[in-house]
Every structure is written in C-alpha cells, then in structure tokens.
Amino acid sequence: MKKIFALITAVFAFVASPVLADQTKEGKAGKTDYYFNKMDANGDNMISREESNTFSASQFEAADTNKDSMLSRDELMAHKKKEHDKHASLGSQDAGDYKDNSAGKK
C-alpha cells in the first residue's frame, strides 16, 4: 500500500510541476498587468509621472528607460523584473539589511 501511495504521489508531482510553474509566472505577470491598468487612469497604455503614485521620482526615472516621461507596460515589467532579481540575489542577512535600510533604519 505504501508503494502505491508513493507511486501516485511521484506521478502527481511529475505531472503537476510544470502546471504549477506556469501558473506562478502568469500570476506575476497578471499582478503587474493589474497594477499597470489601475495606474493608467486615462487608458492610454502609458503611465505618466502624475498617474504613478507608487513610484518615487528616482524609481520612475530608473524605470523610464527611453526617458520620455512615460512608462510603457514593457518598461514597468522590465523594472519589476530587475528589482526582483536584485532582491533575489541578496543573501538572507543582506536582504534583512536592505529591508532595514529601505525603511530608513540602520
């Protein structure tokens, strides 16, 4: 009975892994799309500095790679990926230090 249960569990894990991985990627993209659409108040598929209330001026400038004072969906996605990769590359202690520094604490 234990062998059958182990076999069923292994088959399920093998089959479910790619499906779950795809859902995670779509979930992140969907979340960014949701916030992009929410910030794009006039519906022109661009976010102006005035529409963006979640970015500081320096964050907006960093994300605005073509320097047209507007964020496209691609620029926002690229900025979010860059920030995610930056934070993911920090070690556990460094991540804690970054968190404290970003809140103005040391």
Image (cartoon, rainbow, N blue to C red):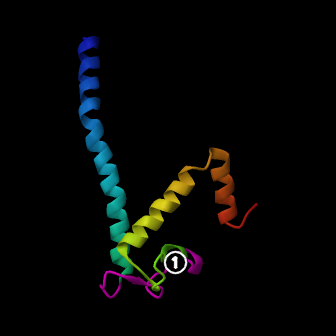
Q: Residue furthest front?
A: 66
Q: Is residue 41 above or below residue 36?
A: below
Q: Residue at x 29, y 18 (%)?
A: 6
Q: Amino acid at mark 1?
A: Phe
Q: Say which quarter of the image contains residue 92.
A: top right
Front one among 73 and 96: 73
Q: Quadrant of residue 20?
A: top left
| Pick the front one: 101 or 65 | 65
Q: Position of residue 96 (x, y in %)?
A: 65, 52
Residue 15 lies left or right of residue 90; in this view the side is: left
Q: How many marks?
A: 1
Q: Which segment is the magenta one?
A: 41-61
Q: Is residue 43 above or below residue 80?
A: below
Q: Is residue 10 above or below residue 74?
A: above
Q: Position of residue 88 (x, y in %)?
A: 54, 51
Residue at the spot x=47%, y=88% of the render?
50
Q: In this view of the protein, which residue sits in the foreground, 71 or 21?
A: 71
Q: Position of residue 23 (x, y in %)?
A: 29, 50
Q: Which residue is pictured at 37% across the width and 58% down the height? A: 28
Secondary structure type for disc 1: helix
Q: Which residue carries the number 1 mark?
A: 60
Depicted 85 relative to depicted 70: above or below: above
